[in-house]
Amino acid sequence: MTTMKTIEACAILAALFAIAPAAGASGEFTYQANGLDWDEVAELCGTGMAQSPIDIVSANAVPASAQKGNRGLTTFDFAPGTDIVIENTGHGLNTMFDVTDLSAVIETPEGPQSLEPLQFHWHSPSEHSIDGVIYPMEVHLVTKTNVTGDLAVVGMMYKYGSENALLNKLWPSEADDFAFRIKGEDSAAEEAYLHEKGAKTETGATIDVMKELLPASKDYFAYRGSLTTPPCSEGVYWHVLKTPLEASVDQVLNFQNVLAETSAGVRTNNRSPTPVNGREIVSFPN
Ligand SMILES: *[C@@H]1O[C@H](CO)[C@@H](O)[C@H](O)[C@H]1NC(C)=O
Ligand SMILES: [Zn+2]
């Protein structure tokens, strides 16, 4: 009897360890397979039918006035952010900030709801693609609706071009506490800035979300999708802005250099695209 129990216990323990092989304990995940193994961390990541990111085929996007669904207009009107804190989450950099007013509004079936900004963070390369085009970097401004508590994300692409002023402010490459390893070079420990998981910095900066983060043209593609990280929860109101921002090659490299390696010399934190499964993509001028 005792022997039997021991064998059972061993089998249970073996099964428990088998559940989370590469992923590690307690819902931790990596970008080793760019999300293709996340069903081991959260089942929905493998079984969800309305996941993100997706490739947006602009020719298939339906003008808002002709849509079959009920996606309402979002009016982007974010107040400036203060008390900015940037944290290395181990999967990228989260930028937290406080806002005074909630002025952006999304029209939902439950009525107009204010969007409360929670944080923004970057992925490289981009997670969404537009007409098959993958961009070097994408930023996600994550917000929560004030009545139903749904997440609404504003995603923007960066193409290679001029140095991005906001990124320069948040990742000060010329500051004494030199921000990032340039082009993969290791930096001295005292110069390391935001390299380690859990590292945080208060920049003291303020940010004009409308002018510094969002592009001048606010036209966007809208669809319902999911978090692009485990637990891959669905019901997220996605906005993917049509006009890309610009960032310099060095800025993109500097960001990639704080990420963990996914294979020798490759540092990425993008989830692979997921199937559209017939979802309607709505095109909004705004
Ligand atoms: C939520 O936001 C809407 C739109 O701004 C506003 O009319 C409503 O009063 C807000 N509701 C709550 C509970 O704050
Ligand atoms: Zn994201």
Image (spheres, rainbow, N blue to C red):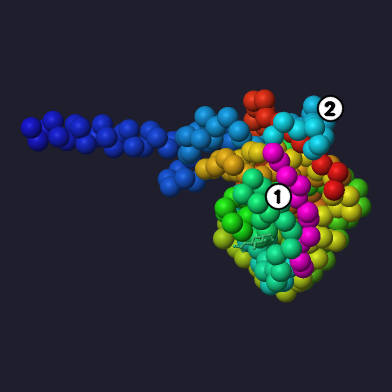
Q: Looking at the rendering, which quadrant does residue 131 occupy?
A: top right
Q: Looking at the rendering, which quadrant does residue 5 occupy?
A: top left
Dot 2 or dot 1: first in sequence order is 2
Relative vertical location of residue 140 with respect to residue 99 in this rendering, above or below? above
Q: Which residues are magenta?
A: 70-80
Which kind of residue does numbered mark 2 sit on? Answer: Ala
Relative vertical location of residue 74 with respect to residue 55 in this rendering, above or below? below
Q: Is residue 3 visible?
A: yes
Which is the main secondary structure of the residues drawn in magenta? loop
In reply to whether residue 95 is colored magenta, the answer given is no
69 displayed left or right of 4: right
Q: What's the residue at 85%, 61% (across, down)?
A: 211
Q: What's the residue at 79%, 38% (across, down)?
A: 64
Look at the numbered disc 1 and give the secondary structure of its residue.
strand
Quarter holding the N terminus is top left
Q: What's the residue at 69%, 34% (across, down)?
A: 69
Residue nearer the viewer, 96 or 22: 96
Mark 2 near ligand 2 (CB under 8 Å)?
A: no
Residue 140 lies, in percent from the top left, at 71, 50
> Residue pushed farthest right?
162
Relative vertical location of residue 196 with respect to residue 263 in this rendering, above or below? below
> Residue pushed farthest left?
1
Q: Looking at the rendering, which quadrant does residue 77 occupy?
A: bottom right
Which kind of residue does numbered mark 1 sit on? Answer: Glu
Residue 82 lies, in percent from the top left, at 72, 71
Q: Which residue is mark 1?
A: 107
Residue 213 lies, in percent from the top left, at 80, 57
> Label 1: how many residues lie within 10 Å, few (<14), some (14-19) or many (20+)?
some
Q: Which residue is mark 2?
A: 59
